Image (cartoon, rainbow, N blue to C red):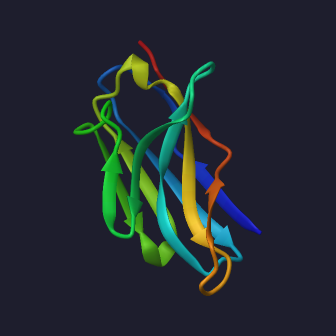
């Protein structure tokens, strides 16, 4: 079983900052990538940022404001959110692409989500 546990969401004023963290635990062989997506009701889940095999990918709407970091030794990924805007309000989901066994296929796993509200 694999678990992704997120922390760090909350309420912040426009222009403020938050830091989200996610730790993966459980039975897996290798994590190929970790990252963050977000979703608002009625819309599709969208990529915020992810690191896969050492390369970083970011969504256009957050580039330059959000910074992703991954600690492979701790199976952790964090997301620093700066200069937050009301349109950043969403549920943020941690994602991991991992294999459960040596040379096994990689699958997507998701956290439960953490809410970020940007409002004055």
Outermost top residue: 120
Residue 104 or 27: which is nearer the viewer? 104
Residue 26 at x, y = what percent?
70, 73
Residue 29 at x, y = what percent?
62, 81
Q: Residue at x 64, y 50 (%)?
A: 111
Quarter in which the C terminus is drawn? top left
Outermost left residue: 64
Residue 77 at x, y = what percent?
46, 59
Q: Residue at x 33, y 51 (%)?
A: 57
Q: Residue at x 31, y 57 (%)?
A: 56
Q: Residue at x 49, y 53 (%)?
A: 21
Asked whether residue 58 is in view, the answer is yes
Q: Quadrant of residue 82?
A: top left
Q: Is residue 102 placed above or below 100 in the rendered structure?
A: below
Residue 110 at x, y = what percent?
64, 52
Quarter in which the N terminus is drawn? bottom right
Asked whether residue 116 is in view, the answer is no
Outermost bottom residue: 102
Residue 63 or 67: which is nearer the viewer? 63
Q: Quadrant of residue 101?
A: bottom right
Q: Quadrant of residue 23?
A: bottom right
């Amino acid at each position: 079983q694999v678990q992704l546990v997120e922390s760090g969401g909350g309420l912040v004023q426009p222009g403020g900052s938050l830091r989200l963290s996610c730790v993966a635990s459980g039975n897996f062989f290798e994590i190929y990538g970790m990252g963050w997506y977000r979703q608002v009701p009625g819309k599709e889940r969208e990529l915020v940022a992810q690191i896969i095999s050492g390369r970083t990918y970011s969504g256009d709407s957050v580039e330059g404001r959000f910074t992703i970091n991954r600690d492979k030794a701790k199976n952790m990924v964090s997301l620093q959110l700066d200069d937050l805007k009301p349109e950043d309000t969403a549920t943020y989901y941690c994602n991991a692409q991992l294999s459960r066994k040596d040379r096994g296929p990689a699958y997507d796993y998701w956290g439960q989500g953490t809410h970020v509200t940007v409002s004055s």
